[in-house]
Amino acid sequence: MEHYLEAFAQWQTRLGYSPATVRSNTQRLQQFFNWLKDEQINKVSHISKETIARYQEHLHTRKNKVRGGGLSSGTIDNHVVNLQLFNTYLQKHDQESLPLEELTQPPRESVTRTILTQAEIKKLYEATDDSPHGYRDRAMLGIYYGCGLRLSEGLALMLEDIDIKRNYVHVKKGKGNKERYVPMNKRIKNDLTDYIHYARSWFLDNAYPCFKHITNHLFVTRMGSPCKPMILNVRLRRLAEEANINKVISLHCLRHSIATHLLQNGLSLEQIAQFLGHSSLESTQIYTHIVNEL
């Protein structure tokens, strides 16, 4: 059954899934195949309802190799959803599908989202400096807080996606391969302009020749290459430390924060959903609960 792995990965890529998602989904399918091998099942046609039930039981009793204990409900849910996705692949390619009729998803564990106050956002900006890294920090805050982009969306931005004249950011491949235009205010526009003209150029001009890359990505490193998630998250946490913000935060926390602040300021759920790129209001309604708890 190993031949399914590459075909499944290629199919996801054609549908517009991000490389990280394709990699994770393929690894989960590999784990399912490994379990089937231990069960002496070597053909999809040999997978029965009882097989699926045993595999789900295996997920509930399997140990977490990293943290110890069992798998979280979120991790089990990811494996279940991945089986459903693989089944869709089989059906789309006129192959024998999996008997998933009795496959169930575990109840989601409540997730505590870290929300920064508007005063704390102000402190983050005040913690930036006028070095090239400081210019990039303000651009980062503008993209992830001011424009509310997802982590992958911000990292995927190219220079041509920033329309300074018309004041918007063009997200070409959002979640589910969806496109949207996100408005930017004067401050974000100015911060991005300063970063692009001064700091980004400085990073590229001063990159070590042996590391230097020719890239059109918006966010670049001291080496002249596209930024990785860890680099920007480390910068954000350093700003939080400078600002004496005693919260564990990430770039996605900025997205949650802007959504909460927009709701507090009277923007409708429909407008916020469009701004964030949500496909349904169900994803946006979580912020009404957050606002009520603040």
Image (spheres, helix red, strand yellow):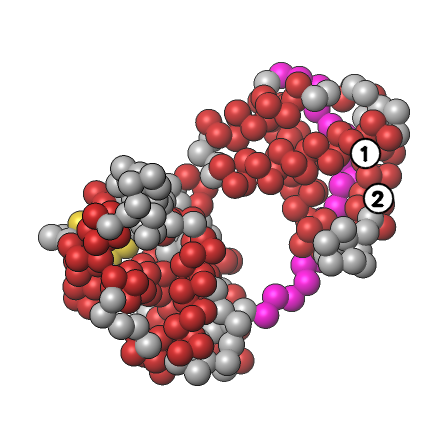
Categorize mark 1 by other alpha carbons within 10 Å: few (<14), some (14-19), many (20+). some
Q: Secondary structure at mark 2?
A: helix
Which dot marks residue 58? 2
Q: Amino acid at mark 2?
A: His
Cα–Cα span, label 1 and label 2 = 9 Å
| Location of residue 31 in the rendering, given as x and y in whole percent from the top left corner | 73, 36
Whether residues under marks 1 and 2 lie with C-beta atoms below 8 angstroms apart, the answer is yes
Q: Is residue 288 visible?
A: no
Task: Name the residue located 21 percent from the left edge and 54 percent from the top edge.
Answer: 202
Q: Is residue 47 visible?
A: yes
Q: Quadrant of residue 145?
A: bottom left
Marks 1 and 2, the one that precedes in the sequence:
1
| Location of residue 21 in the rendering, given as x and y in whole percent from the top left corner | 54, 40
Q: Quadrant of residue 47?
A: top right
Task: Name the residue located 39 percent from the left edge and 80 percent from the top edge.
Answer: 243
Q: Quadrant of residue 134?
A: bottom left
Which one is nearer the viewer's eye here, 172 or 209?
Answer: 209
The residue indicated by pointer 1 is 35
| Location of residue 209 in the rendering, given as x and y in whole percent from the top left corner | 29, 41
| Location of residue 111 in the rendering, given as x and y in whole percent from the top left corner | 61, 66
Is residue 107 located in the magenta-colored stretch of the structure? yes
The rendered magenta stretch, by its main secondary structure, is classed as loop
Task: Name the residue located 62 percent from the left edge and 16 percent from the top edge.
Answer: 94
Which one is nearer the viewer's eye here, 129 or 123?
Answer: 129
- Segment colored magenta: 94-112
Q: Is residue 278 above or below residue 123?
A: above
Which dot marks residue 137? none
Is residue 235 located in the magenta-colored stretch of the structure? no
Determine whether, in the image, residue 39 is placed left or right of residue 294.
Answer: right
